[in-house]
Image (cartoon, coloured by chain):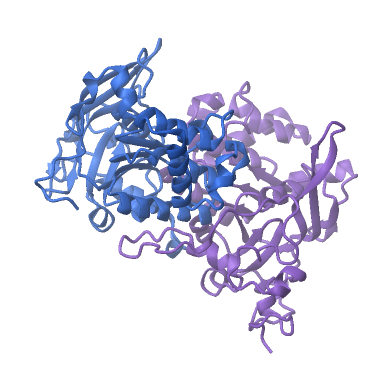
Amino acid sequence: MAAPAVPPVLRAEDVTVRFTGRDATVNAVNGVSFALDPGEVLCILGESGSGKSVTLRALMRLLPARRTELSGRIELAGQDVMAMSHRALADLRGTEVGMIFQEPMVAFDPVYTVGRQITETIIRHEGTSREEARRRAIDLLDRVRIPSPERRLRAYPHELSGGMRQRAMIALALCCNPSLLLADEPTTALDATVQIQILLLLRELQRELGMAVIFVTHDVGVAVEIADRIAVMYGGKFMETGPVREIMRNPRHPYTQGLLSSTVHGSLRGKTLEAIPGSPPDMTRLPPGCAFAPRCRFAEPGCETPPAATQLTPQHMVRCIRAA
Amino acid sequence: MTRAPDAKDGALLEVRELRKYFPVRGGILNRAVGWVQAVDDVDFDVLPGEVLGIVGESGCGKSTTARLLMHLIRADAGRIAFDGEAVRPDDAAGLRELRRRMQMVFQDSYSSLNPRLPIEDTIMFGPKVHGVSAAEARERARELFSLVGLDPAQFIRRYPHELSGGQRQRVNIARALALEPRLLILDEAVSALDKSVEAQVLNLLLTLRRELGLTYIFISHDLNVVQYMSDRVLVMYLGKVVEIGPTAEIYERMQHPYTEALLSAMPSMDPDRRTETPPLVGDPPNPIDPPPGCRFHTRCRFAESVCSRAEPRLGPAAGQDAANGAGHLVACHMRVAGSGHSQAPA
């Protein structure tokens, strides 16, 4: 991990996202703050509706402007993202920052070949010649282990299998050597034997290129495979953050504990699972205090005010009054 | 709860040589230009009171198998017997009776409920079709709500969109149980749920099984969940059964290279024991015109020439008695004496 003197790639402070609609306001992200070191892999772990994907999109201001209230500070490589013009943002996306998604068919335009889309991106951002861009595209496809890359450059996205398409999307995201990769559940739709290949590929590329990665997932197993640090998200807030070992061995937030004990594995056979009662909160009507309190077996009157972040160690933060 | 199924009992469900090919149409005349061999000569038994897990990757035929068992689609060939009685696909009354005794829960909890009906009416629908009076059906619906952990007073008149995913899946389970079936087919029934809710529904399923003496076919791509739930596990690859056996045998003494690869692709959950090399390279092959011989030979690191020539048959695994119907069976040339594979037993 980076020495403390190196400035972070990304710093987010009190990022808040609200979606306003006719009938209700969705409080999707409620004050997320963190700093990401160069070359660090942060996993945001959360269930559906916890705000993890919205957080990722907010960092690049990719949310629909008319319906979104975004506030807070986002600083990327020393630049203030919130103050950037649309033009500057477009330059940033694809160069400094690459993105990959769950569904590669959304990232690719179906009417152009994979090769065309990768070379266009390189030319758009770096102004290289077509020939040079093509050479780099072949090299990239080779790097993400797509067999016979010259031939695949001429393929349309729908002609590739699921795993190949995901590899091509990774090549597209990496084509301008980003210092930060944002990954939104990129392995969720894949089969088990393909998922592990893509995870290992991402881990290897991340090491080789020294990129920082923010990886959003709902799957604890995936997070453990790839993360240096895990942020557990619930009700639009980071409830607990810490190094992956610390979170797995010594989870301190009741939600993290519940999530780990309700994640099924074979050694639990014959035992009743320790499920968390109830369902995830309605983001239009969050409780005033701790969002997890209505499902928490340790809830007490003090939980009705929002718990402050407690630093158990410089790396391990937990947002629960019992830890304070 | 983990009562070992007794192989001497008759099977609740017997499936033999089940086959379904889907045509792939193309060209201006829309002729079949190829066939997806979705389910190809599949044999297995489901024993009374057991949970049979079915695992495999997308396109392996696990969901098609479920639909064939329910007769939601028509098989090209094969025999199915429920409780010792052969099921005849042209016998409409017989099929209706079969679907009373065998019910299914699907992955998408929303699309399997009628959005325009209060959930109570959805649950009453099945029994009413089968001749139960409205008053009795209503009474039974209330009991079912309590059984699946939903307070009838609070929920019974709600519509599907007013429920969370976990609650909707409880309604689907209640709907499936309304006809008092003996066998429940759960096709990825917990896959769309959040982990914290998935655990609640798994607990519910195991409780219901114990209290009502149910038998489950539990289909999932999640190997952890299948291990937790199942007494026996069946592994499918491109329309074929490659291995079947008691859960501990499959997870600890698997004999098919595909089963081994599939299981070692499971994330370790331990940051100090991360996976270092992927067990397989590439994607599963296209199920249209699958490879000849053993369908796994294109990705198998032990493949030899025999594997692309001859198709291995499902047979007793090493150290297993051939007569034991609930034993451990595997379809791999390496486990058959004299198959021509260099690692086959002498």
Provide residue A149's location: percent of width, then percent of height. Answer: 53, 48
Residue at point 17%, 50% (across, down): A2
| Residue B314 horizontal side relative to residue A237, left or right | right
Q: Is B332 drawn above or below residue A112 in the view shown?
A: below
Say which residue appears at 25% left-offset and 48% top-offset.
A39
**Percent of width and height locating residue B279:** 50, 64
Quadrant of the image containing the C terminus of chain B? bottom right
Examine the rendering and report whether any part of residue B189 can be seen. no
Residue B302, given in percent of the width and then of the height, sits at 60, 73
Q: Residue at x 45, y 50 (%)?
A: A144
Q: Nearer the viewer, residue A130 or A84?
A: A130
In this picture, residue A266 sits left or right of residue B124: left
Instruction: Point out the residue furthest to the left here.
Output: A5
Q: Residue furthest bottom?
A: B346
- Picture quadrant of residue A180: top left
Instruction: Please determine whether, in this image, residue B273 is positioned above or below residue B185.
Output: below
Q: Quadrant of residue A285?
A: top left
Which color was chain A given?
blue
Total numbered circles: 0
Residue closest to the eye, B42 or A321: B42
Up-down relation of residue A67 to residue A219 (above or below)? above
